């Protein structure tokens, strides 16, 4: 899952938010120096990723991408699922999305000085440029994915992933709507935080 879904599945605290995103920035390398609450968030991050990556519906979604983009289809699905989460926010949260987003940015900024440098840069860009707002539109998802493609250190054909998404948009949306409640249930049952 991508950043928004990880925060949605976290506890609404600065430590939990920090831990739940740290998994994308060398999390376990830093674990010994972190508080229990941050480490619990980190373990929650890994639980979310493990469940997501092994789920048959997510594998099915990845298979909808063209062969030249399939290597990075997991990234595309993660970002796209943030879009679907926003699109169907009212099904999953009583809190308005705008309020959740502002609260998320506030809590992330509270932990900024504790974050590894690379994470500080990404979180600063995320909050300053309001990535979650851009994830509302499919065009914003396309821009996000093309930016990710530019950061990949070797030649790739991940650019224009939006072509594959547009071909299968409705099918991918239905997969998300079946998968995401299952993920919520799994995380709730494990209760790591």
Image: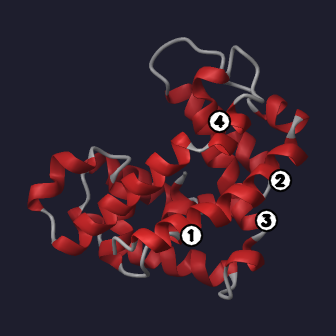
N-terminal label among 2 and 4: 4
**Where in the figure is residue 15, as x and y percent of width and height?**
29, 74
Sequence order check: which comes first, mark 4 or mark 1? 4
The residue pinned by badge 2 equals 174
Look at the image and tell me whether residue 60 can be seen.
yes
Mark 2–mark 1 Cα distance, whole angstroms, equals 18 Å
In the picture of the structure, the residue carrying the numbered disc 4 is: 59
- Find numbered disc 1 in the image and state the secondary structure of the residue it sits on: helix
Q: Which residue is mark 1?
A: 185
Measured in 3D between alpha carbons, the distance from the residue under mark 3 to the one under mark 2, in whole angstroms, is: 12 Å
Q: Residue at x 40, y 77 (%)?
A: 107
Near-viewer residue (69 or 122): 69
Label for residue 19? Answer: none
| Element class at badge 3 | helix
On the image, the x and y values in percent for residue 36 come to 18, 72
Which one is nearer the viewer's eye here, 8 or 97? 8
Mark 4 or mark 3, which has the lower sequence index? 4
Q: Earlier in the sequence, mark 3 or mark 2?
A: 3
Question: Relative to residue 148, is residue 192 depicted above or below?
Answer: below
Which is in the foreground here, disc 4 or disc 3?
Answer: 4
Which residue is tagged 3? Answer: 87
Residue at 68% of width from left, 52% of height from top?
81
Horizontally, is 41 left or right of 29 in the view?
right
Closer to viewer: mark 3 or mark 2: 2
């Amino acid at each position: 899952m991508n950043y928004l879904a990880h925060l949605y599945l976290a506890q609404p605290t600065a430590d939990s938010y920090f831990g739940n995103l740290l998994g994308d920035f060398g999390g376990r390398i830093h674990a010994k120096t972190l508080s229990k609450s941050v480490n619990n968030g980190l373990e929650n991050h890994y639980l979310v990723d493990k469940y997501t990556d092994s789920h048959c519906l997510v594998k099915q979604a990845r298979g909808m991408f063209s062969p030249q983009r399939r290597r990075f289809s997991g990234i595309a699905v993660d970002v796209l699922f943030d879009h679907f989460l926003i699109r169907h926010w009212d099904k999953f949260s009583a809190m308005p999305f705008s309020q959740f987003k502002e609260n998320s940015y506030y809590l992330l900024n509270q932990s900024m000085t504790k974050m590894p440098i690379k994470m500080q840069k990404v979180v600063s860009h995320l909050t300053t440029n309001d990535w979650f707002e851009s994830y509302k539109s499919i065009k914003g998802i396309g821009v996000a994915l093309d930016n990710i493609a530019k950061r990949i250190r070797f030649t790739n054909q991940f650019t224009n992933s939006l072509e594959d998404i547009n071909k299968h948009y409705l099918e991918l949306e239905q997969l998300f709507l079946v998968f995401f409640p299952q993920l919520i249930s799994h995380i709730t049952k494990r209760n790591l935080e």
